[in-house]
Image: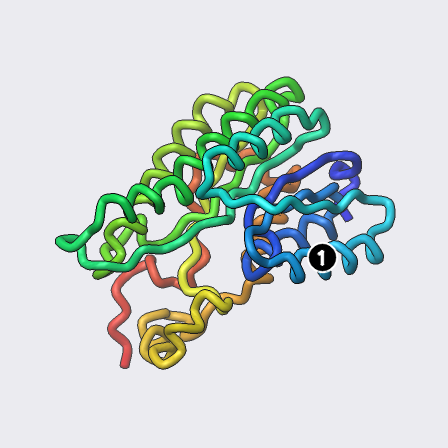
Amino acid sequence: MNDSAKGKTVFITGGARGIGRAIVNALAADGYDVSFTYRGSADEAAQLITALQAQYPAQTISSHQVDLSNRDQVDNLAALIGETDTLYGLVYNAGGSYDTLAALVDQDRAEDLFQLNFWALTRLAAAATRPLMRAKSGRILTMGSVTAQMGVSGNSIYAASKGAMLSYIRTLAMELARKGVTANYISPGYVDTELMAPYADYRDRFEKFIPLRRFAQPEEIGALASFLFSPLAGYITGAIIPIDGGLTAGLSIRP
């Protein structure tokens, strides 16, 4: 447990499953009061709260059902975040995908994805900055993607939304630095979650392009988030932090 986490609140979007759940577990273990959102995973959210409350009875663990593609619901969550005097951080983990060739992009679907992957982030981060700046400390993390840094066929809009997120976070980091608040961009590669289930038939092929020859585990992403929330990470801001098994380090041509 991190003694400096006591009495501090962290909001995590998309926290009931996968990477988000791992981050919720990691930050709760560090001693933070954790409030996470979910959209359709009510049973998983309830089970997670029950388990964490039993494990950490002195901490507050809560959840909120929020559809981050709905602007009114995002505004309601933003208001709650902005009114949290004990706020120490925001982790924006929720997101969606839209796979199609660049020449076939449907603008309505693209705009819906940007609302979920980008505009909701900006609304929540803006709300979080007020209590964080008053406290002169805090953390903002976003869950980006390696696709923001490399071209992937069929991922033009998804990559563009993650690239917009990256540009926003870097600027936010510069604007908040003098107030002691850091903002960073975690850039995962392939992670072993349910989201990868539709691509199970191609897993062996994907792994051949990863220097470490495996997918990341959600707990590894959670551990990285835990470190970035720790006092020892206070000098890291405006950074892209890859956790991709070497995927973006260079061209892998090994057989």
Front residue of 25 and 253:
25
Q: Residue at x 61, y 35 (%)?
A: 89
Amino acid at circle 1 = Ala
**For residue 124, above or below residue 149:** above
Q: Residue at x 78, y 57 (%)?
A: 50
Residue tagged by mark 1? 46
In the drawing, does residue 215 fall left or right of residue 161?
right
Q: Residue at x 51, y 48 (%)?
A: 93
Task: Identify the image quadrant of residue 240.
Answer: top left
In the drawing, does residue 218 fall left or right of residue 158?
right
Where residue 238 appears, x then y in whole percent?
Answer: 44, 35
Front residue of 49 and 226:
49
Q: Residue furthest left?
A: 103
Q: Secondary structure at mark 1?
A: helix
Q: Residue at x 47, y 48 (%)?
A: 143
Where residue 80 appears, x then y in whole percent?
Answer: 64, 30
Visible residue check, residue 82: yes
Where residue 51 appears, x then y in whole percent?
Answer: 78, 60
Front residue of 2 and 161:
161
Q: Considering the image in quadrants, where does the C terminus appear? A: bottom left
